[in-house]
């Protein structure tokens, strides 16, 4: 039976990797990386000498064909992204679907669980998270306002990813839709030196960032608790 691994890797702190992930990264024939330079730092830390090849969101179908050929030849491959769990707002889903389509029952796709920013953020947010709605990255234009309306009306906690470039704009929109009472939680730079989980109304958070411009940096998970 052929095997293909999908391996979660750290979202900042390189110690956040499972023993199983390290073992498999050592054992496979090739590691497919979103950015080989980023993954190299992780591989070097754990003295993993496995060869790497890039596979990212811009990879062409020819690259997928090449990967399928390697699997056909009996090679065991692993897919990682720059941070966290592949396929979760990261490349990988198309590749996994093509692998399943080609090899059907002859291949086992084996996910190796580990960090994901949305799960880490929810676990530290102190909000109802038995069930939640994850929106990945919000669209920049079309449908954005409608989504904010849906977020504000959601009976489930909503979580999404945001970049430092858009966080103030997003807080402005949340402020408009959530009003002056409801809290928002921001999880920033999780597992890293300047890790921070802060909460406040849209207005409070905007004021906080106005006074702390150096904190509009890094990577954010935005959480809006259920209505
Ligand atoms: N696949 C990843 C996962 O499982 O979390 C997500 C990759 S997505 C391209 C990157 C986004 O995840 C960032 O823009 C940010 O919103 C969030 N993220 C990643 N690392 C983070 C961290 N250390 N702290 C907070 N958010 C993070």
Image (cartoon, rainbow, N blue to C red):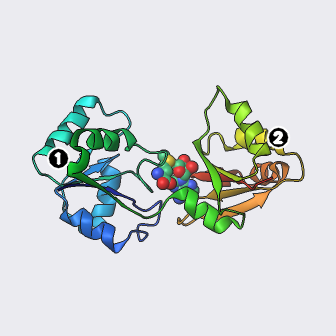
Mark carried by residue 124 = none
Mark carried by residue 71 = 1
Position of residue 140 relative to residue 161, above or below, is above
User: Does residue 129 appear left or right of residue 183 in this picture?
Assistant: left
User: Does residue 96 appear left or right of residue 158 in this picture?
Assistant: left
Front of the two marks 2 and 1: 1
Residue that protrudes farthest toward the right in the picture: 180
In the image, what residue occupies the spot 61% across and 45% down?
A: 164
SS at badge 1: helix
Q: Earlier in the sequence, mark 2 or mark 1?
A: 1
Q: Residues within 10 Å of mark 2 (few under 14, many from 20)?
A: some
Q: Which residue is mark 2?
A: 177
The residues bearing labels 2 and 1 have C-alpha atoms spaced at a distance of 49 Å
Residue that protrudes farthest toward the left in the picture: 73
In the image, what residue occupies the spot 64% across and 68% down?
A: 124
Comparing 131 with 138, the one in front is: 131
How far from the left and from the top, in percent, is residue 61? 27, 30
How far from the left and from the top, in percent, is residue 156? 72, 53
């Amino acid at each position: 039976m052929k095997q293909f691994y999908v391996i979660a890797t750290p979202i900042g702190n390189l110690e956040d990797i499972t023993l199983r992930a390290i073992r498999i990264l050592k054992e496979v024939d090739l590691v497919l990386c979103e950015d080989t330079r980023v993954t190299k730092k992780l591989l070097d830390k754990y003295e993993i000498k496995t060869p790497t090849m890039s596979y990212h969101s811009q990879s062409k179908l020819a690259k997928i064909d090449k990967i399928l050929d390697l699997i056909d030849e009996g090679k065991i491959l692993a897919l990682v992204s720059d941070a966290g769990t592949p396929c979760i707002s990261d490349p990988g889903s198309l590749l996994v679907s093509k692998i399943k389509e080609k090899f059907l029952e002859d291949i086992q796709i084996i996910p190796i669980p580990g960090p994901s920013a949305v799960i880490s953020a929810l676990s530290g947010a102190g909000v109802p998270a038995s069930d939640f709605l994850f929106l990945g990255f919000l669209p920049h234009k079309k449908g954005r306002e409608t989504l904010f309306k849906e977020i504000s009306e959601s009976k489930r906690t909503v979580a999404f990813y945001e970049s430092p470039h858009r966080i103030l704009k997003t807080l402005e929109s949340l402020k408009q839709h959530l009003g002056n009472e409801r809290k928002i939680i921001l999880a920033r730079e999780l597992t890293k030196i300047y890790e921070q989980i802060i909460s406040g109304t849209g207005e409070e958070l905007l004021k906080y960032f106005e006074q702390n411009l150096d904190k509009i940096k890094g990577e954010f998970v935005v959480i809006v608790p259920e209505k």
